[in-house]
Image: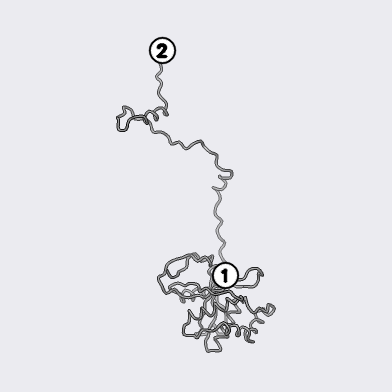
């Protein structure tokens, strides 16, 4: 007589039986571990395998900067060893560049009597600065506002020169790079740099009739320094500012 084959309960029944045992009661046989139920298998979304193989495209580096840019970076770090912050200025009448110069002179060189907005505007309209415009090729613009950064450099240089000071403009682009505006006396030992910022990516303004770049002044941080993300300067990831 053939021996009857013993049926073993399936795994699910064992799991259910184990779950019906009273709490704390001994079990003569340990029930096998129940496999986790993740539901039915789903097919990966279309193109998922392709996206897994994609690699991040590296950001193209900026072209090598010349000696002027390297000098500007070093001078900027030396001028603001504890960090810096923007000085907000009005863009009314598109004269933010002149206002930025005025506020930066006040903040960075307290010993120099600060120019008024009218002083700087009159200096721009003078024959000296208009002669610089001709040399730079800006005479065709006939702009009395929305200034190029090199026009601002000519304004502060001639305004300060009439009062016995040797000033030039240093500026920070939207991506964080620093540059200097050259002057006839920028290699003399008494030259001082007035730092401003611009939202431009190249330092050239007025090329787009629908977008106007904005200038701001700069001052040093004199309080506790904490890292923060500045939303206005896109490429500079962290700036130092007062708490």
Local packing at callout 2 (Cα closer than 10 Å; few below 14, some 14-19, many 20+) is: few
In the image, 80 versus 206, the foreground residue is: 206
Q: Is residue 204 above or below residue 31?
A: below
Rendering quarter of residue 1: top left
The residue indicated by pointer 2 is 2
In the image, 241 versus 182, the foreground residue is: 241
Is 22 displayed left or right of 219 in the figure?
left
State the scheme by which the image is colored.
one colour
Label 2 with label 1: CB-CB less than 8 Å: no
Is 127 displayed left or right of 41 in the figure?
right
The residue indicated by pointer 1 is 199
- Residue lying at the far top in this picture: please name it: 1
**Disc 1, SS:** loop
Q: Which image quadrant: the C terminus?
A: bottom left
Q: Is residue 43 above or below residue 141?
A: above
Q: Is residue 112 above or below residue 171?
A: below
* Residue occupying the point 55% across, 52% down: 55
Residue 139, image x and y in percent?
Answer: 68, 80
Rendering quarter of residue 57: bottom right
Q: Is residue 147 above or below residue 20?
A: below
Q: Give the total number of marks visible in the rendering.
A: 2
Local packing at callout 1 (Cα closer than 10 Å; few below 14, some 14-19, many 20+) is: many
């Amino acid at each position: 007589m053939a021996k009857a084959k013993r049926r073993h309960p399936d795994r699910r029944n064992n799991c259910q039986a184990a779950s019906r045992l009273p709490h704390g009661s001994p079990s003569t046989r340990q029930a096998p571990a129940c496999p986790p139920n993740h539901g039915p298998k789903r097919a990966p979304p279309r193109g998922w395998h392709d996206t897994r193989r994609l690699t991040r495209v590296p950001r193209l580096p900026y072209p090598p900067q010349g000696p002027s840019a390297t000098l500007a970076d070093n001078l900027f770090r030396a001028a603001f060893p504890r960090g810096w912050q923007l000085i907000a200025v009005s863009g009314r009448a598109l004269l933010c560049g002149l206002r930025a110069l005025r506020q930066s002179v006040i903040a960075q060189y307290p010993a120099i009597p600060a120019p008024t907005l009218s002083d700087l505007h009159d200096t721009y309209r003078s024959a000296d600065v208009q002669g610089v415009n001709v040399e730079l090729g800006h005479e065709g613009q006939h702009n009395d506002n929305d200034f190029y950064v090199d026009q601002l450099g000519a304004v502060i240089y001639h305004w300060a020169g009439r009062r016995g000071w040797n000033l030039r403009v240093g500026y920070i682009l939207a991506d964080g790079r620093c540059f200097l505006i050259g002057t006839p006396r920028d290699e003399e030992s008494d030259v001082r740099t007035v730092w401003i910022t611009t939202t431009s990516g190249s330092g050239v303004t007025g090329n787009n009739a629908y977008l106007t770049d904005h200038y701001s002044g700069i001052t040093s941080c004199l309080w506790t320094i904490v890292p923060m993300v500045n939303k206005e300067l896109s490429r500079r990831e962290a700036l130092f500012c007062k708490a």
